[in-house]
């Protein structure tokens, strides 16, 4: 198995961060494998796969480069640079800033990375200087057309996952936060993090930053900028991976207000106030006020889970949401 030896200082400096480039690479992986696990992801794939296939047909060389870079067991390093968490008080890098790192890859580095991904010498047709540039062009296409228009919703989901992982870290330590983060990954103890089940030699992360980055697709990988930074990209929790998965019935919004109705709809499964804040985009105070009203009305209840308080709908809350949804359906059916 592959594992990393992580020093106490590295753990102390570890960060969770959101990356538009990582989200775009994950979306590219979904398009390349033409398969999706979640309803939202399947709907997105059905919309964009035909256009992606036309792109590959129009530029077969770029299609070959991407296929070679995204092998089942390894991804070419130049395509997945480790995300850089922003300093305190600063915004994360934009997609354009992250993509510039891909475009700036030296030709020899890109060729070497692709050879590692292919586990052998490069075919003559891929032994060229523009591997990184052509790969970046494909990533820019995916971002501009298929990811950026819904980036605000995706970012809220990813930020909710980061909040949830941070809460798990405070409750259960690194084992609680990292176990099950991605297939084959678990905390082994004694400062060892298993990152996959492959028979790779261990790697010591000394005086390096460790960065964890969620994506909404069911993919993941590890990445690095040796010796400064190592990254783990992982699929965010399934309960949060469906932005807009539960539309707010119009009748319910008219009855109790759209913002409060949105909170009630989300509470089909238990959520903390921090998750609700991230998912709805509302302020913590607003979410708290909505929860108090819903509690007083008997539409939600709460229970403590470690240091967190989780809220979820009561039977009365479930009935109200169902009735409002049925009312919307009748209105649509009657024209």
Image: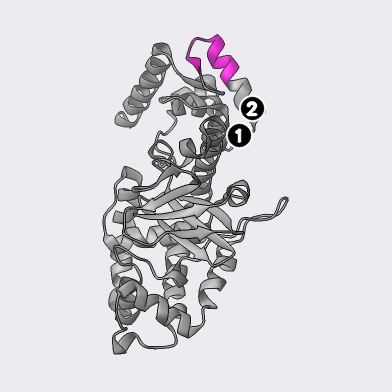
- Label 2 vs label 1: CA separation? 6 Å
* Residue in the foreground of this view, choosing between 258 and 106: 106
Residue 329 is covered by the magenta coloring? no
Residue 68 vertical position relative to residue 199 in the rendered view, above or below: below
* Residue for point 57% across, 20% down: 291
Residue for badge 2: 286
* Residue in the foreground of this view, choosing between 301 and 306: 306
* Residue for point 58% across, 15% down: 293
In the figure, residue 116 lies in which quadrant? bottom left
Q: Residue 218: image x %, image y %?
A: 35, 50
Q: Which residues are magenta?
A: 291-304
For label 2, count other residues whose C-alpha is less than 10 Å away and answer few (under 14), some (14-19) or many (20+).
few
Judged left or right of residue 21, residue 331 is left
| Mark number, residue 282 | 1
Q: Are marks 2 and 1 in contact (CB under 8 Å)?
A: yes
In the figure, residue 209 lies in which quadrant? bottom right
Residue 48 visible somewhere in the drawing: no
* Residue for point 31% across, 59% down: 199
* Residue in the foreground of this view, choosing between 3 and 106: 3
Secondary structure at badge 1 equals loop
Secondary structure at badge 2 equals helix
Judged left or right of residue 142, residue 225 is right
* Residue in the foreground of this view, choosing between 49 and 206: 206
Q: Residue 126: image x %, image y %?
A: 34, 85
């Amino acid at each position: 198995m592959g594992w990393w030896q992580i020093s106490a200082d590295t753990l102390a400096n570890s960060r969770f961060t959101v990356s538009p480039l990582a989200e775009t690479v994950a979306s590219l992986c979904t398009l390349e494998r033409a398969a999706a696990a979640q309803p939202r992801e399947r709907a997105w794939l059905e919309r964009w796969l035909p256009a992606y296939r036309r792109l590959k047909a129009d530029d077969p060389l770029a299609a070959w480069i991407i296929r070679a870079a995204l092998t089942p067991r390894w991804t070419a390093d130049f395509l997945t640079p480790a995300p850089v968490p922003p300093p305190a008080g600063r915004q994360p890098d934009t997609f354009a800033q992250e993509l510039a790192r891909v475009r700036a890859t030296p030709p020899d580095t890109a060729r070497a990375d692709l050879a590692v991904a292919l586990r052998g010498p490069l075919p003559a047709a891929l032994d060229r200087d523009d591997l990184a540039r052509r790969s970046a062009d494909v990533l820019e296409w995916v971002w501009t057309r298929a990811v950026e228009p819904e980036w605000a919703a995706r970012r809220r989901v990813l930020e909710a996952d980061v909040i949830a992982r941070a809460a798990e870290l405070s409750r259960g330590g690194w084992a609680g936060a990292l176990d099950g983060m991605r297939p084959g990954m678990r905390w082994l103890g004694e400062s060892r993090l298993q990152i996959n089940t492959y028979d790779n030699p261990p790697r010591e992360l000394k005086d390096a930053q460790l960065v964890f980055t969620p994506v909404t697709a069911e993919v993941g990988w590890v990445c690095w900028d040796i010796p400064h930074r190592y990254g783990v990209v992982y699929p965010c929790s399934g309960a949060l991976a469906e932005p807009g998965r539960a539309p707010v019935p119009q009748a319910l919004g008219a009855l109790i207000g759209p913002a409060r109705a949105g909170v009630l709809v989300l509470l089909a499964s238990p959520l903390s106030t921090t998750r609700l804040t991230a998912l709805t985009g509302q302020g913590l105070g607003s979410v708290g006020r909505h929860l108090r009203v819903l509690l007083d009305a008997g539409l939600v209840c709460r229970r403590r889970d470690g240091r967190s308080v989780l809220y979820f709908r009561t039977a009365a809350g479930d009935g109200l949401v169902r009735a409002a949804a049925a009312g919307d359906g009748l209105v649509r059916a009657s024209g």
